[in-house]
Image: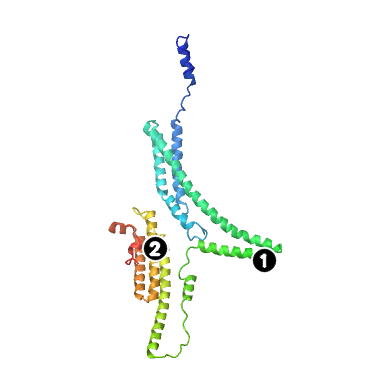
């Protein structure tokens, strides 16, 4: 304003106002109707692409034979990110329909402009959400791939060392590669079932049967030794039974992880129920250890009955997912089917 001419000067007001107007920059004009319509179509297509991308996003990584590290930690995050896949697909279809209706009407108003802008913004947000999910999976995949490539690269390195005459270094390199490959394979295959090598190791730790005993000093001592021998045999039998029950727990836990859910139950509730079932099985296993020590066969019957209830609950859930919620008002749960709290 200081650059304006002083009042009273010849043509001062008119020239000063014209100079002031010339210094103003016009606001950028908003996009036209056709451009806004194209943005909305891109947003709707982005919603569909985001829903399809989340639907095919790998979420079951633990125990797949490849992901040796990070699977148990990243899997819940991927399941959370993949949850709105069906919602994105539905919104994408509805957005295409809404965009088509607005485009056929060819009427520009505040309402239609707001609808087109909202579709564009939601489509961009959904696409970014899907991108984050695939980036998380990609980082985990790349980390595990590098580990496996490291194992594979150790073989030609060992060969080069051997041909250079460094046989000891070649043997050490191969040994390290085999150990690393074994560790990765075991970690990628999930927990070892109790009926496998771990069970054999537990059975091997049982106290060996004693050899020929010295002649009994008295009838009371002989009776005490017979009682102890019977208890050892019963403990050995209970140990084998505990191993079998532990294998059933692992199988039932793995089966519940793949039981589908229906509304109003969702993935978060199902993951909480599976974690609860895992904790209950861990407590049951500890109680069975104590039952072996104190020779309590009744505890094993209770554990077997609870496992049967959990299996029947799972079968009923697979047959009719909505029955339990409609009758009892709760989501299907293996832990809720157990009679004992352990």
Q: Circle 1 sits in a helix, a strand or a loop, which is it? A: helix
Q: Quadrant of residue 155?
A: bottom right
Tell me, yes or no, if residue 168 can be seen here: yes
**Residue 249: x %, y % from top left:** 40, 67
**Residue 302: x %, y % from top left:** 34, 71
Q: Which numbered disc covers residue 250? A: none
**Residue 210: x %, y % from top left:** 47, 84
**Residue 254: x %, y % from top left:** 42, 63
Residue hosting label 2: 279
Residue hosting label 1: 168
Distance between mark 1 and mark 2 Cα atoms = 47 Å
Tell me, yes or no, if residue 196 can be seen here: no
Q: Circle 2 sits in a helix, a strand or a loop, which is it? A: helix
Q: Nearer the viewer, residue 115 or 248?
A: 248
At horizontal 38% and vertical 90% (from top left) the residue drawn is 219
At horizontal 54% and vertical 63% (from top left) the residue drawn is 183
Q: Is residue 171 left or right of residue 100?
A: right
At horizontal 46% and vertical 58% (from top left) the residue drawn is 72
Callout 1 touching callout 2 (CB < 8 Å): no
Hey, which residue is sitting farthest front in the picture?
217
Callout 1: 10 Å neighbours few (<14), some, many (20+)?
few
């Amino acid at each position: 304003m200081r650059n304006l001419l002083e009042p009273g000067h010849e043509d001062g007001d008119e020239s000063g106002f014209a100079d002031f107007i010339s210094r103003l920059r016009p606001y950028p004009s908003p996009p036209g109707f056709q451009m806004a319509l194209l943005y909305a179509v891109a947003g709707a297509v982005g919603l569909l692409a985001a829903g399809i991308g989340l639907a095919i996003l790998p979420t079951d990584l633990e125990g797949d034979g490849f992901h040796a590290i990070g699977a148990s930690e990243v899997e819940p995050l991927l399941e959370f990110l993949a949850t709105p896949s069906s919602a994105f697909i539905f919104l994408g279809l509805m957005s295409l329909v809404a965009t088509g209706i607005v485009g056929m009407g060819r009427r520009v108003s505040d309402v239609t402009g707001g609808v087109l802008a909202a579709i564009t913004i939601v489509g961009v947000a959904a696409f970014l959400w899907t991108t984050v999910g695939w980036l998380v999976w990609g980082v985990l995949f790349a980390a595990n791939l590098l580990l496996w490539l490291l194992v594979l690269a150790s073989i030609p390195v060992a060969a080069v060392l051997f041909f250079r005459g460094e046989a000891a270094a070649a043997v050490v390199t191969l040994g390290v590669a085999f150990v690393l490959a074994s560790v990765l394979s075991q970690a990628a295959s999930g927990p070892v079932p109790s009926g496998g090598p771990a069970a054999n190791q537990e059975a091997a730790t049982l106290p060996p049967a004693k050899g020929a005993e010295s002649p009994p000093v008295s009838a009371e001592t002989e009776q005490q030794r017979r009682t102890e021998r019977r208890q050892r045999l019963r403990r050995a039998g209970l140990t084998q039974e505990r191993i079998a029950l532990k294998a059933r727990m692992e199988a039932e836990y793995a089966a519940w992880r793949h039981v589908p859910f229906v509304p109003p139950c969702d993935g978060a509730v199902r993951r909480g129920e599976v974690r609860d079932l895992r904790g209950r099985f861990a407590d049951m296993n500890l109680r069975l250890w104590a039952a072996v020590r104190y020779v309590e066969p009744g505890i094993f019957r209770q554990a077997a009955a609870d496992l049967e209830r959990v299996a029947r609950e799972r079968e009923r859930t697979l047959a009719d997912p909505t029955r339990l919620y409609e009758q009892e008002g709760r989501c299907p749960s293996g832990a809720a089917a157990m009679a004992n709290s352990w």
